[in-house]
Image (cartoon, helix red, strand yellow):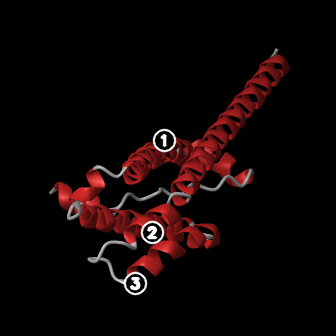
């Protein structure tokens, strides 16, 4: 009778370990998918940078070095390796977009320019997709990191070498403006 009890307990332990492993894998894949979606949205937004730089070149408020920096951002998106570099680059892109649109407000003729209006709508749409994807990624990363931090499961995470995800920090200037 004791043998059957031990056998049943071992079977339950194996089943629980398999379920925990499957949960790790599903949350890991969800976080990886969320990162891929975020990366795609950021690349799509970066594709709009040359058009914006071309439009911004006509603004007298923006100097040449700024236009060159804006133009170089698209290439920099491809060169970033770490998440922290990507966060910094995304913050720079957002700041430069704000500066261009602030300068555009001083040009009332742009309200009638169909090309600029389409470009502005495209950038706003792309920016909203990026912000939404950042939230989804951070949520998926939080879910994965939470399960890897639970005491009995963290041992399993270390055995199978599941590493916690870094969070994609939002633009710090947005928090300052909210206060």
Task: Name the residue tied to disc 2.
Answer: 53
Screen quadrant of the C terminus: bottom left
Residue that numbered label 3 is attached to: 64
Percent across and percent down for residue 107 are 23, 63
Q: Quadrant of residue 82?
A: bottom right
- Above or below, 74 relative to 139: below
Note whether 164 is above or below 27 in the view shown: below
Of pointers 3 and 1, the one earlier in the residue sequence = 3
In percent of the image, x 29 and y 49: which residue is there?
Answer: 112
**On-image quarter of the N terminus:** top right
- Neighbour class for label 2 at 10 Å: few (<14), some, many (≥20)? many
Give me the disc on residue 12: none
Q: Looking at the image, do the residues carrying marks 3 and 1 touch, with CB atoms under 8 Å apart?
A: no
Whether residue 8 sits left or right of residue 145 in the image: it is right
Q: Give the quarter of the image for residue 8.
A: top right
Residue contact between numbered discs 2 and 3, judged by CB atoms under 8 Å: no
Q: Nearer the viewer, residue 104 or 156?
A: 104
In this view, the residue in front, 155 or 108, is: 108
Left or right of residue 175, residue 147 in this image? right
Disc 1 target residue: 136
């Amino acid at each position: 009778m004791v043998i059957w009890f031990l056998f049943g307990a071992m079977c339950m332990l194996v089943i629980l370990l398999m379920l925990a492993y499957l949960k790790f894998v599903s949350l890991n894949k969800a976080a990886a998918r969320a990162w891929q979606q975020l990366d795609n949205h950021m690349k799509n937004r970066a594709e709009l940078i040359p058009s914006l730089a071309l439009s911004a070149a006509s603004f007298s408020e923006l100097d040449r070095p700024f236009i060159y920096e804006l133009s170089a951002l698209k290439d920099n998106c491809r060169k970033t390796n770490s998440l922290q570099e990507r966060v910094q680059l995304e913050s720079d892109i957002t700041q430069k977009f704000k500066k261009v649109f602030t300068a555009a407000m001083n040009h009332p003729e742009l309200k009638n320019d169909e090309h600029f209006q389409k470009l502005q709508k495209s950038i706003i749409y792309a920016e909203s997709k990026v912000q939404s994807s950042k939230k989804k990624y951070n949520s998926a990363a939080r879910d994965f990191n939470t399960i890897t931090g639970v005491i009995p499961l963290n041992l399993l995470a270390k055995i199978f070498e599941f590493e916690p995800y870094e969070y994609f920090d939002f633009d710090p200037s947005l928090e300052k403006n909210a206060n």
